[in-house]
Structure formats: C-alpha cells, structure tokens
Amino acid sequence: MTEFHRFVVDGPSDPADTLAGLAEQFHLRENEAEEFDRRFLDTADGRLHAEQSTLEVRSSVEFPLMCSLVWMRGGQVLASARVEPGATPGLADSLPAGPAFDRLRGLIEMRRLLPVATVRSRLSACSHLDSEEKTTARVQVDVSALPDGRPLPALLEVRAVRGYEDETSALLRAMRTHEAFDPTDLSTADLAREMTGAAPYLPGKLSLELDPRATADEVWREVLRELHDVMTANFQGTVEDIDSEYLHDFRVAVRRTRSVLQEGRGVLDPAARDHFRAGFKWLGDITTPTRDADVHLLDHPTMISALSPEYGDALVPLHELLLARQRSCQAQLAQDLRSMRRAQLGAEWTEFLAGAGPWADAAYGDDAPDAHRPAREVAAQRIERAHSRLVRDGRTIDDASEPEALHDLRKDAKRLRYLLECFGSLFPPEELAVAVRPLKSLQDVLGEFQDTEVQAHALAQFGRQLDAEGADTDTILAMGGAIEQLSVRQARARREFASRFGSFDSPAVAGAYASLTRGATSKQKQKQKPGAKPKQKMTSKRKRRSGR
Amino acid sequence: MKILATYNIKGGVGKTASAVNLAHVAAGRGNRVLLWDLDPQGAATFYFRVKPKVKGGGEALLSGRRELGDVIKGSDYDNLDIVPADFSYRHLDLMLDDARKPLARLRKVLSTVADEYDYVFLDCAPSISLTSESVFRAADALLVPVIPTTLSIRTFDQLDRFVDENPDIVRKLRILGFFSMADSRKRLHRELMEELRQQRPELLPSQVPMDTDIERMGVHRQPVTAMFPKSRPARAYQSLWDDILERL
C-alpha cells in the first residue's frame, strides 16, 4: 500500500555522512542511531522471504535484555512483541498471542522458524516532515556486519507514510538519481545469507524447465534427478523431525518418483524400473505411519474448533495419545531412514541417475521402445491415457458405488496430476493451467472424502484404545462428536462429487486436454469424445466397487 | 474487523483523548488500527498532526465517489492510520439523510477496508443525530466515557434509554461505559463512582484519571501513551484496553 524503496549505498563516503547530507538538503529530522544484534528467522522454504517480509529477534547492544520479535515488510512493522533474551520462536504456537502474530501463524502454517542469518546493525533513522511537523516519510540507513566482523553493503531505505506519497516525491527522485545509491530488492538478511553462502530456501514447487525437443529417456531422468534433489533436500529435516512439512515434501517426491517410474514403461530399462519401483514403494511405505500421525496432530485444532467449547479439554487425552504415537512412529522412521537398506537404495539410485555403475550399460532396444522418441510425444500419450482412464472410471460411479470406487478414482486423479506436474513444462503453460484447474477441484473433493473416512476410522480405533485405558466418559463422547463431524463432512464431499466430476467430464475440459496434447503425438487418436460411452475395459475389481 | 466508537451525548468528557490513546495502545500491541475522526472540530486529527481535509469532503466518502482507502493517512506510529476530520462533517446528518439506507451507510463505507484493519475507532461528535444512529449501527461497541458528575451520569441514562427504546437501530451493540477524568481527590467523584459501580456493575473496572499529562497532548500533539508511556493516564488507557478486549 505504501511506497517503499531500498538502495545499496555505494561509494567512498560513510553512509551516515551521506544521510546527514540528505538531511540537510531535505530538512530531515535525524533521530538517534541505535545498535542492535539481530537474528533473522524464516521457514526452510523461505515463506517470509517469498512475500518480502523479514522476522527477527532484535536486541539492543546497549540494553541486551531489551529483546523484541519484529516482523516487517517494506519498512513497516507488521507485528512486534517483547520476548525473553535468547528466545527462539519455532512452531506457530510459540509465537506471541494476538491478531498480528495470527497472520504470521497463518503464513508459516506447520513450518518451523529457523535462524537464517545473524548480524549486528547500526540503524540511523530520519523523518521527513511537513509543515505540521508530521512525518511524511521515514528514511533509514542500515550499516550491518556479520558476527565475524565482515561488513555488509550499507542499505538505505525510504518509506513514504500512507497518504503522503506526493509530499515525498522530490526526496525519492533525488535518491533515485543519487550516484551513490543503487536500487536493490535484497534485505539485510538476504545480503547476510549471500555473504555466508547459506543454502537456498527449499523450493515449494518443482522448478523443471524441460526441453520439448529432448528424448523421452533424457527427460524422464531429468525429472527423476529433480525429484531426487527434493528428497535429498528434505531428508535430514525428515530424520530430525524439524517440522512435519519435511516429511510431507519427502513423501510427495517419493510418490512422484514412483509415478514417473510407473509411467516409464517403454522409456526406462525394465529391470532398473522394476527394481526401483519396489525400492521406492518400500521407502514410501515406511513414511506412512508417521505422516498419518502428523496429519492427526495437524487436524487436532480443527477438530476441537468444530466441537462445542466444553469438549475442548475433554480431548486432551487424545492429544497426548496422538503425540506419543507420533513420537514412536517418528523414532521408527528415523531408524529406517538411517538403515543400510535405505542407504543402499540411495546409492543405487544416484548411480542410476548418473548412468553409472551397474546401470551404465542399461540397454533399451526392444525393451524400451519409447526411450528415444520425443519426450513431448511420449508424455502427451501418457497424459491422454491417464485422462481417459480417469474419465472412464469416474463415469462408472453413482450414488450406490462403494467408497473404494472413489478411493480408486482418487489414485487415477493423482496419477494424472503427477504427470501434469512432472512433465507440464513440455507443454504451453496457459493450456496446462486450464487442464490442471478442474482436476485440482476434483481432487480436493476426493481428498476430503477419503481423508475424513480415514480419520474417522482412526479416531474410532483411538477411542477404543482410550476406553480400554479407562478414559473419561467426556473424552469418549467428544471423540464420538468428532467422528460425527467427520461423517457430516464426508457426506458433504460425497454429494459434491457428482457436480465436481461433472465439471471435469465436460466438453470444455476434454477440449482443454485435447488441446494440451494435440500436435505432440504423430499418431494422435481421439479415443473418446466428451459425453461418449467409455470403450476401455474395466477390471473386475473396479466393476465390483462401482456396483456394476 | 471490530468497530469501536467513542461516544457520549455530552461533550468534554474525554472522548477524543480516549479514542486517540486507545487507538495508539491497540496499534502498539500489533493490531492494525484505523481511527476515523468524525468530529468536524478535528481534535483527533490535530493530535496526530494530520491536516483536517478530505478530498471531496464527507459527501464523496458517503456517496462512494471516493474510496475510504484513498483518504487514509498514516500516522507517525506503526499500524495506526487516520481518516482525518473535514469541516464538511458538520453536515453529515444532511448527507446521510440524502443517502439510500442512511443507517447502513457508515458500515458499508468501512467494509471496504475490512481486510486491512483489526480495529477501527470512530471518534464521534457529541449529540444524538442521524450520524450517531449510523455509528450505532456500524459499531460493535460504544466506548462511553463518563465523568463522575451528576450531569454526566444523567446523559449516560439518556443513552441507556435510547438503546432500550431503539433495538432496531442498535441491534447487537455493546455499551462499554467507563469513568473518565476521574479525580480521586474529590469526595464527590469518589462517592459517585462507588454508588454508580453498585448500580451498574457492567461498567469497565479501569478508570482514566484527570491528569495534566492528558492536557499536554494538545501541546505535544501526541497520544499520552506515546509521550509519557509510564505515566498514570497511559497505564490507565493500557488497562482500559485490556478491559475492552475482555468484553468484545
């Protein structure tokens, strides 16, 4: 909302002198300079950095016991609170109370705040005043150094107070044209991280930019390498349980890897493909109990808020049970991830991706007929097939279908989604977006349907356990209430399914998928027209589940 | 976004000082706060050193020709913004009278900034008028400063009667009364406060003292909570804000 500009102060003169010169020229009122020790915090995936804000524990050098937690964006304090010296906020519940920090809680969600940079700063500030002595802009010079004494480039920041942008235009013009000032987007924390060679923030999404002219085996390996990087980046955080998102991202990368291997029939060496599919299935399976336990804990506050307030305390024993369960699952997971089996899988996989070791001579020939075809063509065929399958299976579901039919459909949807996510950059982005949107909407409702069912089953099981351990009647009643809430949500998702699937199975969406893959395949066959009866065969298992 | 209006039918009871200091206290605790100076005298605007001028006047805001967000001015304090007073506000009643659904008008104008603020303080001119009725409809709570004098207490009774007799206007409005300009050295003040607290246990426990530091706000053009944060009145406003939060 307010105008904010940041410059690197370059040149031989002391930045404080530069500020004094400006103060004289523009009648700025100089405020007292202060020295602070500042520890910047962010999540592993840089959520604060991504929205150009910073969070710091700041203590005055002169009064080290005066310690504050300050969240800022564009030179403006979004939230601040006194904290104990040495305070290290971590997860959302360790942040101070109040609406301002609620917004920060909403931003970091389940992620832990981690120290990302430490500096000592001398902050000199000036106020630009109007005829009423009202501050119309704030100017600050930040001269910081790393703990080892290495200085950071000095920064000058100007923020026009809201509603006073016109009054400060002359000042800003002078700064923009000042030979010693270079505009920058980098904050003090960014500069410190840059100087100390800090690891980059974990990417939230895959950052693949695949070459549509490349062959299928090249692209498949590139995608698998990227997914391997995601697994590697999240491995240690998963072992140490820094926050639940490490495991989540690790698991997603494992699932995507499995999916890319599955779709690699005809592209990858069959023996290698079978070997690693089994390996990653095992790796996925060992992470499931901990993820389930994490999800129960993450959903606990929502569950409490859906109940009458008097039941809040009644669920404390359940929370304790969930915590104990998570700890025990996590301990087992850490052990499995440090095992020889996992290490061997990791080493073999690295060799495979590098085309080294026993995989160096992996033959393609007849066993991998698609390996040297254009990647875009092969990916388009896979997408087309996954889309047809999802449409075909979805059309068999009606009100009488078993829940398993929806669960199977969720897998179909995931398969298509992973293909679009992993190979999407081979296709025009605008067409990709049109294809993903209705799929995501369908997945949301399928996810809600299955998650509520799984949670209700788990809660019933926990209830029996707590009952056997002599839990209070209120606890059992509250859990019954929570199961009831889940079944209401599940029923709502079930009702919503038909309309979401209807939107997905529309001529417009079918057209979007056709347009996405059009031209990518030489032997393009329109197997299924929107609204036409599915021609592909259904497995007998699916027939049973769908009630046919 | 919660809307709180400092209001009393009677003038000179500490409405503006309460709005200015409570807004500053709330912002100081990390809330995003907007103070709208609805009193054409513009005392709150003056305290924040903002010029008492709104482009197009109150009519432009009420008619929707100008967005509220376009006339907001940042104060010298983090998270605290001002909608300045304007001399045209003396005709707010007439402007509202001409508008469609006059009682809902103010709330509608404020709804355009609902995502930007946690608390809005409306500093109202004394009177019962169409403007104050529109304030009653917009606000979640009325903060009513009461001087412990017989006359001031009578105006509080008048407000009570109005609230009882006009449920369609006030709807779910909370009335949060508190003693203002209380002088504990005066026997009359002490006695009246004691008597009134027995009659009206819903009065907020904190009371704002009569203090020269509050008078100095006009000289320094700052909230007393910024100027003298450890002073008796500053502490009183801090604890008054705690009381208000408990009742919201």
Image (cartoon, helix red, strand yellow):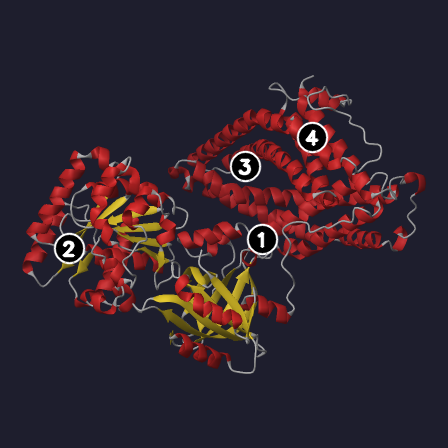
Judge depth for marks 3 and 1 and give the one in front: 1
Rendering quarter of residue A411: top right
Residues at marks 3 and 1, common chain?
yes
Per the model, the C-alpha gap separating discs 3 and 1 is: 24 Å
Q: Secondary structure at mark 2?
A: loop
- Give the residue at mark 2: B13
Q: Is residue A479 above or below residue A155?
A: above
Residue at 50% from the left image edge and 35% from the top image edge: A467
Q: On the rendered structure, is B181 left or right of A395?
A: left
Q: Identify the subunit bearing mark 1.
A: A
Give the percent coordinates (x, y) of residue B26. 33, 56
Q: Chain of mark 4?
A: A
Q: Which mark is residue A243?
A: 1
Judge depth for marks 4 and 1 and give the one in front.
Answer: 4
**Comes first in the chain, label 3 or label 1:** 1
Mark 1 to mark 2: distance in Å?
53 Å
Per the rendering, the mark at residue A493 is none
3D distance between C-alphas at marks 2 and 4: 70 Å
For marks 3 and 4, give the one nearer the viewer.
4
Tell me the distance, in whole angstroms, between the alpha carbons under discs 4 and 1.
41 Å
Callout 2 touching callout 4 (CB < 8 Å): no
Q: Are marks 4 and 1 in contact (CB under 8 Å)?
A: no
For the question of whether residue B229 can be seen, the reply is no
User: Residue at label 4?
Assistant: A511
Query: Between residues B73 and B89, which one lies in front from this camera angle?
Result: B89
Residue type indicated by callout 3: Phe
Three-letter residue code for mark 2: Val
Residue A46: image quadrant is bottom right
